[in-house]
Image: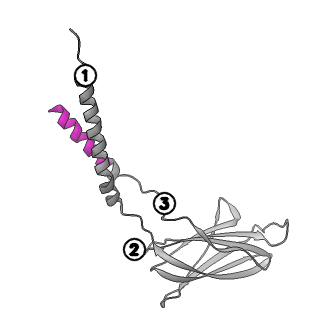
Amino acid sequence: MTGQRSSRMVVWLACGALACAVPASAHDGPPYPIISNQIAGAYRISVWTDPDTTDDGTPGGQFWVMIDSSSAGGTVSPDVRARVSIRPLDRSGAVESQWTEPVNDDPSRRFVVLLMDHEGSFAVHVEVESAAGRAALDSEVQATYDVRPPRIMLVLYVVPFLLVGFLWAKLLLRRRRSTIRPTA
């Protein structure tokens, strides 16, 4: 009777641990470049994106802007800043625009997350400015839904494997107990 009680307790504890797990910051694919080492004014600019769209109003479109000097051996001014703007190309919609934030306190590496409210094509406009001047670049990106399942589905996917593992371990322990008998 205690064996059944302990096995039920293990199953419930495993399910509880999975249900309370903190979601990982993962995505369905790696970021990819939409602008690579393009010279614009005093800058050499690259833009990478992970264009996830959401229905719940949370921003999901991630943009990384890398800014280098266009001159050989030149450095980027510490006052450099970049603004990323997106607008839908396949329907009417508002322009979403924000200034980027430095990554790891490096002004030449910038990041921003913007709301992409539907799947489809978006125009991307990047403006860079500093004491060295201004520059602007345009590109397009195809936004898609993040295909990660909800957390409850992950629990449902994992439970059968946990149960099989638990039954297998229980069977191994039962076999071991039956082969090891105390000698009198």
SS class, disc 1: helix
SS class, disc 2: loop
Foreground tag (3 vs 1): 1
Residue 179 location (% of width, % of height)? 25, 22
Foreground tag (2 vs 1): 1
- Which quadrant, please, contains the C terminus? top left
Q: Amino acid at mark 2?
A: Asp
Q: Amino acid at mark 1?
A: Thr
Q: Pointer 2: what residue? A: 56
Residue 167 location (% of width, % of height)? 26, 40
Q: Quadrant of residue 175?
A: top left
Foreground tag (3 vs 2): 3
Is residue 84 magenta-colored? Answer: no
Pointer 1 local density, CA inside 10 Å: few below 14, some 14–19, many at least 20 = few
Residue 99 location (% of width, % of height)? 62, 74
Q: Pointer 1: what residue? A: 179
Q: Pointer 3: what residue? A: 26
Residue at left 28%, top 50%?
160
